[in-house]
Image (cartoon, rainbow, N blue to C red):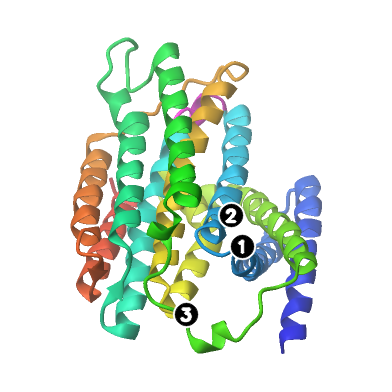
Amino acid sequence: MRALTRHWTTVVPLLAAVVLAVAWVTHPSGPAVIVVVLALVGAVLSAVQHAEVVAHRVGEPFGSLVLAVAVTVIEVGLILTLMASGGDDASSLARDTVFAAVMITCNGIFGLSLLVGAVRRRVAVFNAEGTGAALATVATLATLSLVLPTFTTSKPGPEFSGSQLAFAAVASLLLYGLFVTVQTVRHPDDFLPVEEEDSDDEQHEPPSTRSTLLSMALLLVALVGVVGLAKMVSPSIEHGVHAAGLPRSAVGVVIAMLVLLPETLAAVRAARRDRVQTSLNLALGSAMASIGLTIPAIALATVWVSTPLTLGLGATQMVLLALTVVVGVLTVVPGRATLLQGGVHLVLFAAFVFLAVSP
């Protein structure tokens, strides 16, 4: 069984890359889109498998950091590509994508991980110090980059001036770098699971260096496939959203969900093994990387891309963000959560999705 798993997780990312290359040239439509979707699903599942191999080798908190940063770097590339080709219609693309990523990770993945952990052990236990530090960093990054542009007056509309954008980019990058240093060097114990792994997991020896390097390479191939294939199906998504009379921001939500599928599945699998802290590391780390890496990259891209950049959130979005932070703090402080806390975060996520399609 293990050999079979190794075989399909090696083949599927390569097949996804081939499908992506063909789709990039042919721009499939109609029934051909089904093949793209199947390749996308396969790439997601294989990415989770390879991420777990790498995580098992390097251990926590490095394991969750690998997947979060890998997905975000490729996601940033996708955003910049769409901004460069989208014209004025793409002015709010970065804001919509980053905000969707924050809501998906801090409510969807966060709540689902707590729910799965609480179902298994009645109470999901995690490290309040590390999780609280991560949540505080996410809240600060989100406020600096997505809330303040709505209230600044140097430039009309919810936009930063050039100097303000530069400050937000530098501050975001420095804060993200500081958090990674604390997480991996200064206080890594604050981000380790409180509960031990199942005995079945403890019996497995860490993978060899060769297997780890192979898995890391295939993980990157799979993630490129996930993001690239998500871009390929985005025209079909846009057509369906337009036909349904939904706002354009709903497209960003759907694409963000597709891109974050590997992290979602990895977080749920960790929670099922009583490693809720690993799940929360993935969720909050992804939210942090989405802001801390995207904003600096976009600020740099504005030197070459003349597309207007709308970063400020609307009133409804700011209310959801504020409620997410408040509820997150109340969830994190005790260091343990029940089904109720998981359910509250999932209801907030459902509210975000509903208001995205019916503002």
**Secondary structure of the magenta portion, mostly?**
helix
Please say whether residue 24 is visible from this viewpoint.
yes
Q: Label 2, on which residue?
A: 66
The quadrant in which residue 340 appears is bottom left
Q: Crowding at label 2, few (<14), some or many (≥20) Cα neighbours within 10 Å? A: some
Residue 197 shows which numbered tag? 3
What secondary structure is found at the residue carrying circle 3? loop
- Percent coordinates x, y for residue 89 in the rendering: 50, 29
- Percent coordinates x, y for residue 5 in the rendering: 72, 81
Give the position of the C terminus as an image quadrant.
top left
- Percent coordinates x, y for residue 159 in the rendering: 37, 20
What secondary structure is found at the residue carrying circle 2? helix
**Disc 1 residue type (three-letter):** Val
CA gap, disc 2 to disc 1? Answer: 9 Å
Q: Residue shown at 22%/61% (left/top)? A: 331
**Disc 3 residue type (three-letter):** Glu
CA gap, disc 3 to disc 2? Answer: 20 Å
- Percent coordinates x, y for residue 205 in the rendering: 66, 80
Q: Residue shown at 47%/73% (left/top)? A: 270
In contact (CB < 8 Å): disc 2 and disc 1: yes
Q: Label 1, on which residue?
A: 58
Query: Range of the magenta residues?
Result: 87-92
Of mark 1 and mark 3, the one earlier in the sequence is 1
**Disc 2 residue type (three-letter):** Val
